[in-house]
Amino acid sequence: MHHATAAPPRTSEPAPGLTPRIAVLDVLRGIAIIGIIPVNVSAIARWGYDTAPTPRPDDPSPIDVVTGLVFESRMMPLFALLFGIGFALFLRSTRTRTPRPRVVLTRRLVFLAIVGVLHHLVYPGEVLAFYAVGGMIILLPASFFPRWVPLVGGIVLTIAGAPFSGPLLIPGLFLLGLAIAEYDLVTVLMRRPGILAAAFGAFTVAAGSVAALQLDEIALGSFSKPGRIAGVLTMFALATGVMLLMRSSVAARTLTVLFAPLGRMAFTNYLCTTALVLALACVIDAPSIPWLSEYGYIVMAAAAPLLWAFSTLWLRFFRFGPLEWVWRTVTWWKPQPLRRSPHRAGD
């Protein structure tokens, strides 16, 4: 059994050019957008909800092991961390455009909450509204404090919340993401490959050690405490690993082509995923079909190329995804430029 993981949208403003920091964040967000699909499909489609639970053998199948060790409780922490980072980056950029940046940011979060409430009507497992409220009651107040406060608070709350996941983990990761952006740690680590490699190695070893304990509890999914802890550690291993790869020009180009379009249109792609899965559920009457983990990967394999092609094609002509543009327009309370300028190919 698992707990569905929703994907919050990106909250940072795209830079005119893809700086290494922004490129890394877009790639990570794109990876997470695809990675949540096999975890969320059954909850979105209510797949198997009208049938008896599908019996599983005592020994987990290879698919269950992959889900438990690679996807379950791994993507939600990454999105929560990215949400905190995006919050800080947006606040930083907004300060250069208005004397009241937090008013603009509050309007942005209110719109996200409204979308989340509407999305909840078709997908009760979604967390957009929760993220929006968390941004208002956790991140907004924290932004008034010196940057060491969210850093310390984020570390303490993340460690304390890791065994529990969900609402008890997200506040710590929000604060940690805020602090990471305030200290510009992504840029700092990208310039210090030795420290970055050491961090990647430490998180990988720690994640592997805890995941070994999770193997006996794979069937529990996100209810496994070792799995939750391993999920947070795996998330940091993934993030630092991607940062290491992005230091190579060849790897950076490859990852950027494959995942950055998905990440730049995360808000649109998240809601499009829900629409695609709901359409599939209606066609095949998913609630009446017993759920198997394998189905999540089939849906992911079908949806990922569609989302990638749509995002890549759209961004050739437009600066932002369609819902990202609506969000920006509401945020600034005036229409924002959408079409790409031929003189600003880096947008």
Image (cartoon, rainbow, N blue to C red):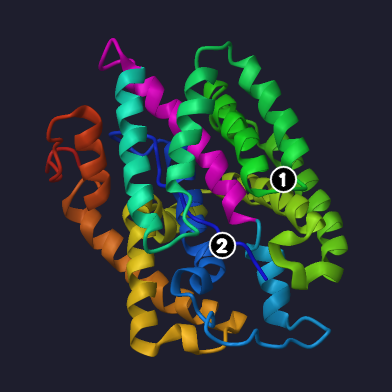
Crowd band around label 1 with a 10 angstrom C-alpha radius: few (<14), some (14–19), many (20+): many
What amino acid is at disc 1?
Answer: Phe
> What is the C-alpha distance between the residues marked 2 and 1?
27 Å
Q: Is residue 93 left or right of residue 333?
A: right
The secondary element bearing badge 1 is classed as helix
The secondary element bearing badge 2 is classed as loop
Q: Is residue 331 above or below residue 46?
A: above
Q: Residue at x 29, y 60 (%)?
A: 312
Q: Was residue 79 drawn as part of the magenta stretch in this picture?
A: yes
Q: Quadrant of the N terminus?
A: bottom right
Q: Is residue 341 left or right of residue 313?
A: left
Which numbered tag is attached to residue 262?
Answer: none
Which picture quadrant has residue 313?
bottom left
Would you say the magenta stretch is mainly helix, strand or loop?
helix
Res 60 visible: yes
Which picture quadrant has residue 72?
bottom right
Residue 21: x, y in percent? Answer: 47, 36
Q: Residue at x 73, y 60 (%)?
A: 223
Q: Was residue 258 drawn as part of the magenta stretch in this picture?
A: no
Q: Foreground mark, 2 or 1? A: 2
Residue 231: x, y in percent? Answer: 70, 54
Q: Residue at x 43, y 44 (%)?
A: 129
What amino acid is at disc 2?
Answer: Ala
Per the image, the residue denoted by label 2 is 4
Name the foreground residue: 245 vs 96: 96
Q: Is residue 305 above or below residue 323?
A: below
Which numbered tag is attached to residue 200?
Answer: 1
Q: Which residues are magenta?
A: 74-101
Residue 4: x, y in percent? Answer: 56, 62
